[in-house]
Image: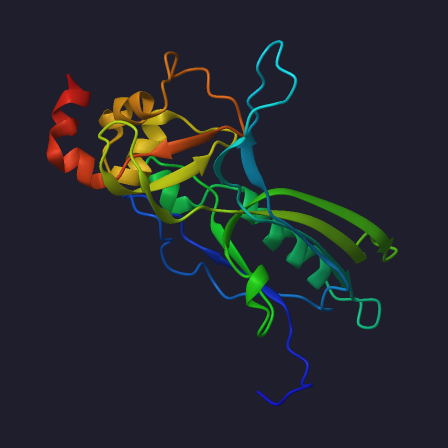
Amino acid sequence: MPRGQKVPAHIQRYQPPTSGGSQPGGALGGPITFMFNPQQLALTKSANWIPHVVRGAENVGVAEFTGSGPRTLSLDVFLDTTENHSRSVQERVEALLTCCVPTKASIAAKAPSPPWVKFAWGQFQTVSFYSYVSQINATYRLFDPDGTPLRATCSMTLNEISGSTPGQNPTSGSRTARRVHRLVAGDSLELLAYREYGDPTVWRVIAEANDIDDPVRLPVGRQLLLPAPEELRDGRVDDAQR
């Protein structure tokens, strides 16, 4: 594409995985193209550390790094149809709101989940990653006499969905692929087990890997280690189902 040519930003929705794995399914419809490219993008990346404080010590101990946090992208989508008075403002807001609603396919698979999404804008790859939409705030600012919205701003927050990373598995001591999942509202160990391994009955593998005594109390925002599927094939599935 010629340098300097305008490229519209857009959000593409994807079917969430319902049979395990860390990759989404096929695209859900066409991209939601922005009427106007963003004037500002806020990208956040964090690192998690555990401070070691010793009672009575003059100096603190060396902090322990526990992992990188997911990227978070915040942006505003500006919509305006004052020139042609069409219904596209309302239609695009409704399309964006579906990013927070379980897809029909995931409901049919008994693993309800909103779609995965990816923001894309030309060659700007740093802000393009698979994510889930945690929040959308739509503010309507101008209306036709019949109540049709003509102008709106949608503030969105996209949270990166972690992929597979190599690391030390706490239950086996071997080097295996593992995935970290940040809990969101509606998550359960059975649902995570179904998404990751295709079998909700092996939820105890996740509970053991994260020292969870009460599977009902799962605080939103907590990061859970999802053991590699290889561990299940090594015989831990039978142990978890007992």
Tell me: residue 38, above or below residue 242: below
Residue 82 is situated, as x and y percent measured from the top left of the image, at: 84, 67
Q: Is residue 193 something that shows in the picture?
A: yes
Q: Quadrant of the C terminus?
A: top left
Q: Position of residue 32 (x, y in %)?
A: 59, 63
Which residue is nearer to you in this view: 35 or 187?
187
Residue 125 drawn above or below residue 130: below
Residue positioned most to the front: 58
* Residue at far bottom of view: 2
Task: Count the marks.
Answer: 0
Which one is in front, 77 or 54? 54
Please say if 122 is above or below 41: below
- Quarter of the image holding residue 89? bottom right
Q: Nearer the viewer, residue 166 or 87?
A: 166
Q: Residue at x 27, y 44 (%)?
A: 19
Q: On the rendered image, what quadrant is the N terminus found in?
A: bottom right
Tell me: 176 left or right of 107: left
Colouring method of the image: rainbow
Residue shown at the point (41%, 31%) measured from the top left: 224
Name the spot of residue 129 as percent of width and height, x first. Answer: 51, 57
Q: Is residue 83 left or right of residue 63?
A: right
> Can residue 109 be seen from the camera position used here?
no
User: At which x and y percent is residue 75?
Assistant: 70, 54
